[in-house]
């Protein structure tokens, strides 16, 4: 862990606690693989030389464990301890019935988002929203049951949901009673009412010859004095739930001959064994990123995704200049972000994964800032392209060139659209040189991916670029 933390500090980055836990779990997994391989060779227990060999095996895993994967910017990372395992996420449920929120109702769901409606929004306040009360009796005057949280606060009371029938006509309509602040209520259809804050009793009078329909049930909105009845305060239950995952295998073989290794070192000063390892691990990372980004695209295309912002037509209209036309793209990106929030009520788009044309268009906007080091070496597969304001821009050359996915990547499991679950980040065998002077080495990674909340994704397109 000290080696990894030192690497982070040299890069000007901070290693977070959850990253330490993931790295520790993955190191333990690699060690298990190493011990099993030694047992298969007939070694019954580890020795000092085994420990040194294990350290040599671990060194190539360090870069793979660091956030060099694009996947780290798209998914929440949660290491698993076996190939068939479980990933965990959190839901928040109501612990106390309050208004139209019943104990056990989901307030924040990892797979859905924040519950909609005024009741959940006011759950953490002194307002009781739409508490169900007694049904009408078909009489002119009815007395509702006492409300739950006492005493009520005068001036805050609204009674709704009851249907009253006025004799003239007759006219039947749903009537809402509002508080006058003096112990009386006035209905919007002419009825009246009274209430007692201390007892919570509400009396409604439809007027002479009129009636309150017996088939309806009232709902009461009111505030109460919290210190007098703390039992009415809303509570939260944190529920940790899980989903099963199966790790995919990302294997790769490396072959080279001794003559090539000698020639490369003599001519260019490169060590072929090291260069081969770099290319192999790069290809594995590329394969993993492609899987994760395909999951993101599938989520954005699903029925549960946030509404698409639509297609941005790059064509310049008559009398319009290109510089002003490309600024219109920001409206589509903002709309996509707003759609994610509307779907989840707790997240806005902060990452854009785009095809080549999309990223080329984005980099022309004045707010765009290229990623450090971009352009100094050719990218292999998806790569961090830069930032546009607060949004991270990732280029995926293997998306359709005119397609982009906008998503929210949170900082904990409650805000997980995707979970990336590494099991073995990178395992390598020792190089073996055969009698024909061919050297072989094997590499392998294992990881799982799980879609959690498709509402944190949306897809947009551009045309005529």
Image (cartoon, rainbow, N blue to C red):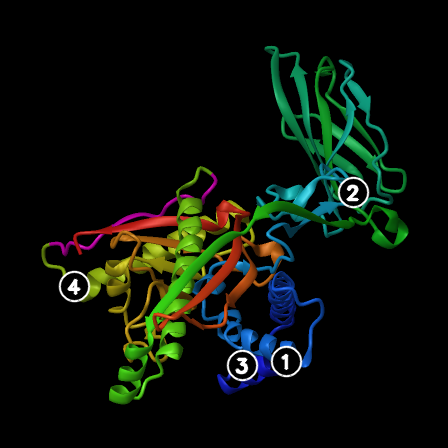
- Tell me if mark 3 has few (under 14), some (14-19) or many (20+) residues whose alpha carbon lies within 10 angstroms of its own: some
- In the displayed structure, 378 sits above or below 6; it is above
Q: Residue at x 21, y 64 (%)?
A: 324
Q: Are marks 3 and 1 in contact (CB under 8 Å)?
A: no
Of label 2 and label 1, which has the lower sequence position? 1
Task: Say the numbered circle drawn on residue 10.
Answer: none
Residue picked out by circle 1? 49
Of label 3 and label 1, which has the lower sequence position? 3
Residue picked out by circle 2? 182
Which of label 2 and label 1 is nearer to you?
1
Which of label 3 and label 1 is nearer to you?
1
Q: Nearer the viewer, residue 197 or 28?
A: 28
Of label 4 and label 2, which has the lower sequence position? 2
Q: Nearer the viewer, residue 365 or 151?
A: 365
Of label 4 and label 1, which has the lower sequence position? 1
Q: Left or right: where does residue 401 sit relative to residue 132?
A: left
Residue picked out by circle 4? 322
Residues under labels 4 and 2: Cα distance? 63 Å
Q: Secondary structure at mark 3?
A: helix
| Residues in magenta, as a range | 304-317
Task: Say the numbered circle drawn on residue 8.
Answer: 3
Which of label 4 and label 2 is nearer to you?
4
> Residue 332 occupies which quadrant of the picture?
bottom left
Q: Secondary structure at mark 4?
A: helix
- In the displayed structure, 434 sits above or below 182; it is below
Q: Residue at x 15, y 54 (%)?
A: 315
């Amino acid at each position: 862990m000290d080696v990894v933390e030192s690497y982070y500090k040299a890069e000007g980055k901070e290693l977070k606690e959850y990253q330490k836990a993931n790295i520790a779990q993955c190191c333990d997994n690699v060690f298990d693989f190493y011990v099993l391989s030694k047992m298969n060779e007939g070694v019954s227990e580890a020795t000092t030389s085994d420990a040194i060999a294990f350290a040599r095996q671990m060194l190539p895993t360090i870069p793979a464990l660091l956030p060099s994967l694009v996947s780290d910017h798209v998914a929440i990372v949660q290491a698993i301890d076996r190939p068939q395992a479980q990933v965990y996420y959190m839901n928040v449920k109501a612990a106390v019935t309050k208004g139209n929120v019943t104990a056990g109702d989901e307030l924040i769901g990892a797979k859905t988002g924040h519950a909609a409606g005024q009741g959940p929004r006011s759950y953490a306040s002194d307002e009781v929203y739409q508490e169900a009360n007694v049904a009408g009796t078909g009489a002119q005057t009815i007395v509702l049951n006492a409300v739950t949280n006492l005493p009520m606060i005068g001036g805050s009371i609204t009674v709704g949901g009851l249907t009253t029938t006025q004799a003239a006509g007759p006219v039947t309509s749903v009537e809402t009673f509002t508080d006058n602040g003096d112990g009386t209520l006035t209905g919007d259809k002419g009825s009246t009412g009274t209430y007692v804050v201390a007892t919570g009793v509400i009396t409604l009078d439809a007027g002479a010859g009129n009636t309150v329909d017996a088939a309806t049930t009232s709902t009461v909105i009111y505030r109460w004095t919290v210190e007098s009845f703390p039992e009415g305060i809303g509570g939260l239950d944190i529920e940790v739930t899980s989903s099963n995952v199966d790790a995919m295998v990302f294997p790769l073989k490396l072959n080279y001959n001794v003559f090539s290794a000698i020639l490369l070192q003599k001519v260019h000063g490169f060590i072929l064994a090291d260069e081969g390892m770099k290319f192999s691990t790069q290809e594995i990372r590329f394969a993993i990123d492609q899987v994760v980004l395909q999951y993101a695209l599938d989520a954005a295309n699903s029925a549960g995704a946030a509404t698409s912002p639509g297609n941005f037509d790059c064509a310049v209209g008559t009398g319009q200049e290109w510089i002003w036309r490309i600024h219109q793209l920001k409206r589509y990106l903002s709309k996509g972000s707003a759609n994610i929030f509307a779907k989840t009520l707790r997240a806005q788009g902060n990452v854009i994964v785009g095809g080549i044309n999309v990223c080329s268009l984005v980099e022309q906007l004045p707010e765009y800032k290229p990623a450090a080091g971009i352009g100094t070496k050719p990218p292999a597969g998806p790569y961090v392209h830069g930032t546009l304001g607060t949004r991270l821009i990732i280029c995926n050359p293997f998306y359709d060139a005119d397609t982009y996915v906008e998503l929210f990547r949170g900082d904990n499991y409650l805000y997980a659209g995707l979970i990336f679950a590494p099991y073995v980040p990178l395992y390598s065998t020792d190089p073996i040189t055969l009698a024909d002077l061919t050297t072989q080495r094997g590499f392998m990674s294992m990881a799982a991916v799980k879609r959690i909340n498709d509402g944190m994704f949306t897809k947009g397109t551009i045309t005529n670029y």
